[in-house]
Amino acid sequence: QAQLVESGGGLVQAGGSLRLSCVTSGSIFSRYTMRWFRQAPGKQRELVAEITNSGSTNYADSVKGRFAISRDNAKNTVYLQMNSLKPDDTAVYYCNARLGLLSHWGQGTQVTVSS
């Protein structure tokens, strides 16, 4: 059972930047597709960005050009660099590791963007 621990959330003004990190336990990190989701109050959880085990990336339209996902397999870590943050980006951000039917979640980290 993999364990995921997110960090890097916080309070930032609109236009600012944050970098989220997610460290994953276990020895098969490099095989996982890693994804970042977010959930704002009263809204459904939505996929923000994903990176496959081969390094291919995909982004939600709302964050394209502002967010960048990357991974460091040597550190079992996936990152989400968030630039030009907007109040609409305020949410709890969750890290997810997926491999076939396996799906593991972190506990989430709060990101709050003030206007």
Image: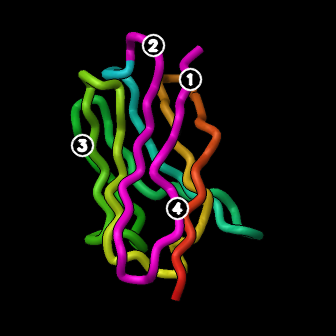
- Residue 8 part of the magenta segment: yes
Q: Callout 1 environment at 10 Å: few (<14), some (14 to 19), or many (20+)? A: some
The amino acid type found where label 1 is placed reads Gln
Q: Which mark is residue 10?
A: 4
Sequence-first disc among 2 and 1? 1
Q: Residue at the location (57% across, 28% down)?
A: 103
Question: How was the colour assigned to the protein in this rendering?
Answer: rainbow
111, 105: nearer the viewer: 111
Residue 76 position, x and y percent, is 35, 25
Q: Secondary structure at mark 1?
A: loop
Q: Check disc 1 and report the residue beneath it.
A: 3
Q: Amino acid at mark 3?
A: Ser
Which span of residues is magenta-colored? 1-28
User: Disc 2 marks which residue?
Assistant: 26
Question: Farthest residue toward the bottom?
Answer: 115
Q: Which of the two labelled residues, at mark 4 and mark 3, occupies the earlier sequence position?
A: 4
The tag on residue 56 is 3
